[in-house]
Each structure stands twice: as C-alpha cells, then as structure tokens.
Image: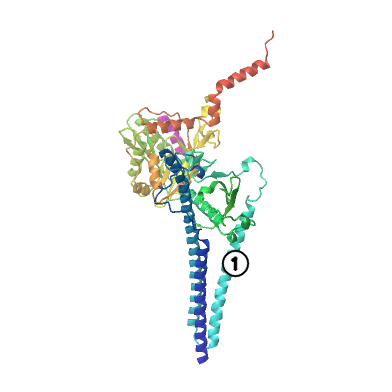
C-alpha cells in the first residue's frame, strides 16, 4: 500500500515537472522569435516631430492623382504641397522614408500578434492535456495495478483523439492540395471556346478594374463591398509577410537566393490580378518592385474552397401562405385590363391563394376600374379583392403604404406590384419561399422588355404578350437598378417604417425602402426571377419632376427602348440605307 502511494506521488511530480518544462520552452521560443523578427534599427534621426503626415495620391500606389482615395504609404499629396509651398527639397524623401518605416513596423507588429496568439493557443492546448492526465491520476483509486490501468487508459484515450484529429487534418490538407492541382494555377486546361474562359480582375491599392461591372456600371472603382476590401487587404498583408520573412521561413526553391536586405511595404506593390473558379478557389498574383528598376517580385497565392457543408434540410409548406398583391393605379385602364387578364389566369385559376388590393388615385376612369374588377369576380367567382380610392395626386409610395396598412387579417405576405408587370405562378411560390417574417425579405430582379416594335421590325409582326416573354439579350435586360417589385411580410414593412410618403410622382420611394432593409438585421434576398417581367410601355417624364427624379426617369426611358446594338442600328440607319442603295446600283448598272 505504501508502495502504491509513493508511486502515485512520483507520477504526479513527474507530470508537474514535464508541464513546467513545456511552459518554459514555449516562452523561450516566443522570446526568441520576437528577437529574431524585430525590424532593423535605423540610424536616421526621428522626423515625426518636424514633418507633417504624408497625404494621399502617391502615383506609385495605383492612384491616379486627385480624386483617388489615400492608400497605405501614399505621399503624392505631401510632395505636391511641399513643391508648391517652396519647402526644402529633402523633406519629401524623409517623409517617404518615415511613411515606409511606419508601415514596416505596423506589418511586423501585426505578424508578431498572430504568432503570439498561435503560441498562446498551443500553450493552452498543452495545459489542457496535462490537466486531463492529472485528473485521470487523481480519480484512480485502489492498488498500483488500477493506478497503472487508469494512467494507460487516459494516455490511450488522449492518444486516440490526437490521432483522429491529426488524420482529419491530413485529409483536409490533401483535399485543399487537390483543389490547387485542379485549378489553372501552374498550367492551363483545354477549353471548348472563348466563352469558357474565366477572366481575371486587376487591382491596385486603390482601384479594382472589372469586366462584370455590377450595379454601379463602373469599369473601375474602389471596392465598395466590405468583404471585397477585407479580402484584398488580407491578400496584400499575407504577401508582404511572406516577402519580409527570414530566408528559412520563405516558401519556394529559390527563397534563399532571393532574400535581400530590402523590407517591402505597400508602396512597393504595383498591381495584382485575381479570378475565382467557383468549384476550386480564388487565385491571386501580386507584383512588387524589386531591388532595381528592372527587377520585380511576384507572389502567387491561392485560396482553396473547402468541401460542401450541409447547413439546413427543412420542409416548407406554402399551402397556408396567402399573398396580398397591392397595385397603385391612376388612369391607365387599358393596362389594368391586361393586368387582370394575367391575374385571372395565374392567381385565380392556377394559384388560388391571392388577395388583390387596388389603390386608385383620383375619380377619372374610376368606374371602369371597378367594372373590370366586378366582371372578373363574376366570371371566375373571385371575391378576394379590395378597391381603395384616394382623391389626391398620384404617389406610388403613398398608394402601397395605404394598401399595406389597410389589411386587417393578420400578418400577411405582401407583393408590391405595378400594373405593367407580368408574373407566373412559379414566381408566386418563389415569393413565398424567399421570405420569412422577421428574417428575410425578397427583392427579385425582373426582366424588362424592350420596345417590341423595334425588336420585331414593325407593329404588324409583334406576337402576343405570352410569346414575347423570352429572356434573351435582344428582347430585354435584367432591371438590376429597379427595386419597386418586392415581397415582404406586413409586420416587417410596418416595423421598418414603410415608405417615405412625401415623395410624389415617379421613382425614389422604392430605393428608400430598400436601403431601410439593408440597414436592418433582415436578410435581403436579391436574385433574378425568371417568372417576373416588365412589359414595355411608352414612358413620359413630366416636366414637374425635380431634376434628380427627371434624370432617373430619362435614364430609365433610354434603357427601356432597345439594346445597345439595336440603338446603334437606328442611329446609323441613314448610312446603312445609303450603303444598300449603292449596292443595288452596282448590281444593276444603267445601260448607256
């Protein structure tokens, strides 16, 4: 018995010594790393008390002069200011040096913080393992055989868990390496045509140059989205850390040869290119200035995509989800009859879970609107509609707001619609599936038709509306700048504050509501909808509109007429007709 007690005390003492040695070793490694990776000391005198802080627009940072935002390490504005004010010629060089040294220290501090965090994490993991062994020994009760079994069992369990974690990590690393080997990084792959090429985007410290211009339509711009800014910032920081790492820590076969005394900073970055293969990962190639004017450093980074993870598997029942379609209207009775024809076929005969709310402005043609609704009610036995009249100037936001608040049947799904919209039964289900009270709102991107007279050549060749609903580049375009058609629950609309009812006439109210949702915690689902169409109609921009609304109206009118190529054919039609006449004359010369 005495022998067992002595053995247990010896094991506890041995474990404590091993833990102390590991803690001391980790601290020593951390101190050694800090001393090794500290930036070189500069003998230059400090200038921060005598020189102003560097300004933006340094030409070497990818900026383009005035109007380009400041980038890290930029000093172009300070140079211009010094030269215009007659400052000392050497101040600019000291200022550049000071800016670069500040950037170098910042990068080193960031790198050291990451290393210290990793060491702390490793130390904590070791401490947890030692604590587990100690608790296992304390729980052991009985003879030395039981103590020995407990120690072996705990060690075996910990060893098995460690081996399992190591195996999972190895499998993940192998998968990520396979993603790298599949991607077009070191070699190209055979492509069937030019349409299969995945183009690169190029970027500098200040600008991204892109082929897919998105909503802004700018071929070059500052990264607007926060995730894009953070992505490129992380890539640049990783590249600089790799360039400034000691030769023993650099990757690549020529790392030792390329190691120099130069410390790279963001001002050495020239440009980069990036592209994403959606099933493999994102490739980055960054170019930096080297030791001389003809020498460059290029880093290739790859962010592999991991395997798919199942997030949710749920069943959604839409049987008891009615939709209240709200349509503001003022005159335009012919368009309303066409709308009701589509409504009768899709909402009444196919779907059957729809309520229609029409908010009419004024008294003129009011009787025709009521007659159209009553005829539909008699023909298909449809009673789920509400007609509201407002004796005031037309305001789309005001009409939708009144229609939404007039509903008294609980929390209903709202679809804000216009009289010149055509939708299918599939779209109504898409509206139900992409909304959730308190969580999600749906902003579909509808397909807007061009002028059918221009598309089909003449009014006589224009087919029926149903036959015009073809999604092609010559028949229309995705109206990604429009936010008027939207699905949301009434509770979310009320809680967000509804429309700005002070906006009169055309445009502007939908953007305000859209931004309210973007500033909230609700998820905004923005996606093209193949079952939602905007039918072409001639647009009139009233002279009474304010300048900003009138400009928006004219831009929308120009984009609605025809595609770029079709408008070009109209613009150059006289030259085309002259060319055809000459061709006809040459083929049929007159007899002399």
Q: Residues within 10 Å of mark 1 (few under 14, many from 20)?
A: few
Q: Can residue 53 be seen in this view?
A: yes
Quadrant housing residue 395: top left
Classify residue 11 as left or right of residue 386. Answer: right
Is residue 72 depicted above or below 366 in this figure? Answer: below
Q: Position of residue 489 (x, y in %)?
A: 39, 48
Mainly helix, strand or loop, the magenta region? helix
Q: Tell me if residue 340 is in the magenta stretch.
A: yes
Quadrant housing residue 371: top left
Is residue 366 depicted above or below 156 in this figure? Answer: above
Q: Position of residue 218 (x, y in %)?
A: 49, 38
Q: Residue at the location (62% across, 57% down)?
A: 255
Q: Mark 1 highlights which residue?
A: 167
Is residue 481 depicted above or below 52 in this figure? Answer: above
Q: Position of residue 162 (x, y in %)?
A: 56, 71
- What span is in magenta? 333-345
Query: From the image, which quarter does the C terminus lie in?
Result: top right
Q: Residue furthest bottom?
A: 2
Frontmost residue, 40 versus 202: 40
Q: Is mark 1 on a helix, strand or loop?
A: helix
Specify how the rendered protein is coloured: rainbow
Classify residue 589 as left or right of residue 389. Answer: right
């Amino acid at each position: 018995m005495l022998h067992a007690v002595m053995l247990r005390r010896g094991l506890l003492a041995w474990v404590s010594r091993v833990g102390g040695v590991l803690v001391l070793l980790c601290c020593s490694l951390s101190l050694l790393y800090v001393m090794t990776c500290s930036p070189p000391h500069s003998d230059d005198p400090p200038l921060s008390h005598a020189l102003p802080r560097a300004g933006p627009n340094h030409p070497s940072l990818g900026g383009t002069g005035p109007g380009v935002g400041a980038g890290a390490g930029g000093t172009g504005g300070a140079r211009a200011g010094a030269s215009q004010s007659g400052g000392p010629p050497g101040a600019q060089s000291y200022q550049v040096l000071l800016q670069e040294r500040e950037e170098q220290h910042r990068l080193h501090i960031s790198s050291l913080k990451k290393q210290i965090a990793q060491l702390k994490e490793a130390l904590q993991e070791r401490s947890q393992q030692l604590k587990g062994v100690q608790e296992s020994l304390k729980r052991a009760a009985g003879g030395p055989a039981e103590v020995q079994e407990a120690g072996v069992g705990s060690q075996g369990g910990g060893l098995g868990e460690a081996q399992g974690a190591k195996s999972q990590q190895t499998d993940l690393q192998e998968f990520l390496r396979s993603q790298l080997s599949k991607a077009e990084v070191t070699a190209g792959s055979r492509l069937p045509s030019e349409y299969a090429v995945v183009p690169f985007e190029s970027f500098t410290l200040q600008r991204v140059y892109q082929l897919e211009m998105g909503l802004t339509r700018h071929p070059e711009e500052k990264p607007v989205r926060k995730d894009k800014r953070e992505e490129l910032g992380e890539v640049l920081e990783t590249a600089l850390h790799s360039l400034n790492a000691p030769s023993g820590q650099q990757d690549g076969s020529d790392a030792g040869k390329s190691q120099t005394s130069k410390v790279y900073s963001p001002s050495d970055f020239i440009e980069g290119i990036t592209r994403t293969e959606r099933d493999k990962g994102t490739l980055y190639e960054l170019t930096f200035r080297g030791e001389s004017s003809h020498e460059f450093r290029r880093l290739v980074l790859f962010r592999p995509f991991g395997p798919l993870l199942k997030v949710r598997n749920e069943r959604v029942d839409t049987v008891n989800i009615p939709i209240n379609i709200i349509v503001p209207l003022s005159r335009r009775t012919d368009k309303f009859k066409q709308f009701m024809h589509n409504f009768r076929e899709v909402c009444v005969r196919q779907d059957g879970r729809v309520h229609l709310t029409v908010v009419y402005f004024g008294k003129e043609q009011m009787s025709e609107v009521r007659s159209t609704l009553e005829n539909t009610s008699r023909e298909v036995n449809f009673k789920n509609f509400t007609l509201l009249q407002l004796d005031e100037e037309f305001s789309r936001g005001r009409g939708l707001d009144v229609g939404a608040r007039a509903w008294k049947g609980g929390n209903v799904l709202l679809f804000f619609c216009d009289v010149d919209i055509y939708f299918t039964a599939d779209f109504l289900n898409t509206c139900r599936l992409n909304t959730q009270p308190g969580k999600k709102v749906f902003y579909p991107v509808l397909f807007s038709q061009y002028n059918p007279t221009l598309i089909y050549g003449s009014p006589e060749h224009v087919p029926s509306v149903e036959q015009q609903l073809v999604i092609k580049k010559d028949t229309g375009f995705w109206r990604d700048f429009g936010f008027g058609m939207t699905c949301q629950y009434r509770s979310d609309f009320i809680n967000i504050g509804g429309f700005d009812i002070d906006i009169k006439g055309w445009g502007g109210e939908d953007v305000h509501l859209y931004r309210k949702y973007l500033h909230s915690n609700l998820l905004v689902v923005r996606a093209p909808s193949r079952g939602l169409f905007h039918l072409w109609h001639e647009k009139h921009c009233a002279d009474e509109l304010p300048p900003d609304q009138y400009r928006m109206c004219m831009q929308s009118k120009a984009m609605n007429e025809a595609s770029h190529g079709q408008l070009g054919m109209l613009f150059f039609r006289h030259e085309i007709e002259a060319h055809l006449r000459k061709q006809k004359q040459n083929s049929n010369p007159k007899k002399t």
